[in-house]
Amino acid sequence: MTRPNDLPLQRLKFYVTTDYPCGYLEGRQARSLVASPTHLIDTATYSELVRLGFRRSGLYTYRPHCENCQACVPVRLRVYDFTPNRSQRRAWKRHSNLTVHVGPALFDKEHYDLYRHYQKARHAGGGMDSEDVGQYRSFLVQSQVDTALVEFREADELRMVSVVDMLQDGISAVYAFYDCSHPQSSYGTYNILWLVEWCRRQGLPYLYLGYWIAQSRKMAYKAQFRPLERLVDDTWQRWETVSPADVL
């Protein structure tokens, strides 16, 4: 792994985990490269790590390190070059009545209840649909970087929560969960569109979308937002279209 000439980053240690079941591709084993110790990973250091393809899950900062598999592709959206397509414009209009509140990464029972219902509706049996408050806290609330929880409400009803990390050159979309009782909604799309506008208002050029995985329906949607850049050999490359060769 290439490391910038940055003292805090040079002080970190990196280790490879043992194999564990892949959370995205059924029947596969995965490994991660983990940055340690966590107390040295502040917002500036984490910004550098994200530019190297790392992500955060609670206090755990990692990137895929799987032998013989390159399915997880870090991607980011160039927000100043982005133009929504027709479907995305419809989603923006459909949810334009939502009000937004940005708050700190703190536990909120209303957020947790929405998260629990979202997991049961969308990821039943995936191991994250239990009523474990501790799991929720460690996954989305614990953070040593500049993290915000963005609430989207319709009147007084909580419709969606988006967890984001504020970086030096952009925003990293960590996770979003929403009300699944409205089948015609496009909350996930609206979340990304809103974050694009937030990046622009703050003069930030990139929205980091995590990993694009061609064979995972949960991740493939990211290719609908263009122009993307993907990280290849520690270099960000413009990637405007997805060709059949990109689908593994």
Image (cartoon, rainbow, N blue to C red):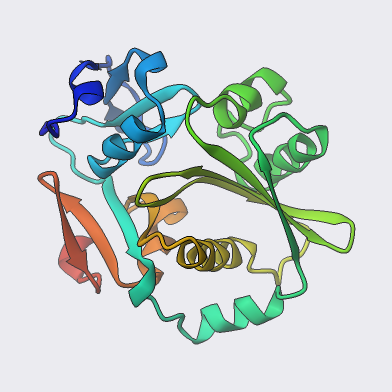
**Residue 198, image x and y in percent?**
53, 62
The spot of residue 112 in percent (x, y) is 75, 35
Q: Quadrant of residue 136?
A: top right
Task: Answer with left or right where residue 134 lies relative to residue 19.
Answer: right
Looking at the rendering, which quadrant does residue 247 occupy?
Answer: bottom left
Q: Relative to 64, say whether 242 is above or below.
A: below
Q: Quadrant of the N terminus?
A: top left
Q: Residue furthest right?
A: 156
Q: Measuring 37% from the left and 23% from the top, which residue is drawn there? A: 41
| Quadrant of the image occupied by residue 185 | bottom right
Locate residue 240, reporting x and y percent: 24, 73
Q: Which residue occupies 66% across, 37% down?
A: 104
**Quadrant that contains the C terminus:** bottom left
Does 182 appear above or below 33? below
Who is closer to the viewer here, 244 or 228? 228
The x and y percentages for residue 114 are 76, 43
Q: Is residue 86 left or right of residue 95?
A: left
Tell me if residue 214 can be seen. no
Residue 4 visible in the displayed image: yes
Tell me what residue is drawn at x 33 percent, y 57 percent. 76
Q: Is residue 74 above or below residue 98?
A: above
